[in-house]
Amino acid sequence: MRILITGGAGCLGSNLVEHWLPKNYEIIVIDNFATGKREVVPDGIAGLTVIEGSVVDSEFVDKVFTEHKPDIVVHSAAAYKDPDDWQEDALTNVLGAINIAKASEQYDVKQVINFQTALCYGIPQKLPIPVEHPTNAFTSYGISKTAGEAFLLNSNAPVLSLRLANICSPRLSIGPIPTFYKRLKAGQSCFCSETIRDFIDISDFLQLMDMLIAKEGENGVYNVSTGEGKTIKDVFDCVSNYLNLSNIDVPILPPGDDDIPVVVLDPSKTMEVFSWQAKVSFQDMIEKQLAWYDKYGITDIFSHLKNK
């Protein structure tokens, strides 16, 4: 099986590479290394081909598909670093998705798996958020990712679009977990937003991905989550307890204008259709994440939210 992973040097992409290479799949990674790390997909690894380039470049995408003829495409590439860079978000998240959709059509890809942000739902009208909930994104990242998803789903390629909870995994460098860990280790102050999110362990996510690539011709949209919401203060408490820090008076601030108070996804459709369910507990997941930071550290921390 030949699997093309766009954004394969990013957090999720590189974890998939490490998970699938031992299964003797042929993995092709494309990445422009704007946020992905070249060192996590080194040259000279048997079964792995790494090609530098952007999904925005249709000629580049077509050349990759022509030369490698992937059976499966995992579309993980995304722009998210600068919430005010609408043009970059639109180019990567919309035009890039169009290029992947067109190439997948042309080369008869058996399955396209798209990674979508839970921010596509905007301010939820119902909790936990069912997959049938209307999309109403209002940030550049959310709007552009939702438009890209729509183009993929309207193509003639078989597309599964996964609307993802916060996935805890090696090399995670975005969000409250690495932020709290890094700041508390450095003796710096923190604050918690008064928000609720759902978190899922990488092992549960990888189990689902194994199931999905074993299928062909599937279409549809699915939430990937535990369905369990946790406050950002819950995350802070787990990190501070892990670091043996106690009695920390952390301010809890209301969410900013570009944030959403509660994002908790309902995974019931995914559980029913694929007979899958997340198994790792919140506590175990956070401790696994922090133990990884103990061993390897944190390189970068990005956020899709504006700095106040």
Image: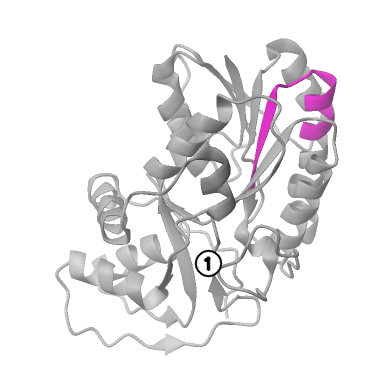
Residue 116, percent across and down? 65, 50
Please state which of residues 49 and 232 is positioned toward the viewer in this rendering.
Answer: 232
Q: Quadrant of residue 303?
A: bottom right
Q: Secondary structure at mark 1?
A: loop
What residue does disc 1 label?
Answer: 264
Point 74% across, 19% down: residue: 65
Point 69% across, 32% down: residue: 218
Residue 260, percent across and down? 60, 75
Lateral position of residue 298 relative to residue 184, left or right: right
Establish if 230 lies above or below 40.
below
Residue 132, percent across and down? 70, 59
Establish if 103 lies above or below 95.
above
Establish if 241 lies above or below 294.
below
Identify the coloring: one colour
Please state which of residues 204 and 53 is positioned toward the viewer in this rendering.
Answer: 204
Point 39% across, 47% down: residue: 169
Lateral position of residue 9 relative to residue 106, left or right: left
Q: Quadrant of residue 246?
A: bottom left
Please state which of residues 147 and 273 is positioned toward the viewer in this rendering.
Answer: 273
The stretch of residues the image draws in magenta is: 100-115
Point 75% across, 63% down: residue: 135
Question: Extreme left residue here?
Answer: 244
Residue 160, percent across and down? 67, 39
Residue 286 shown in magenta? no
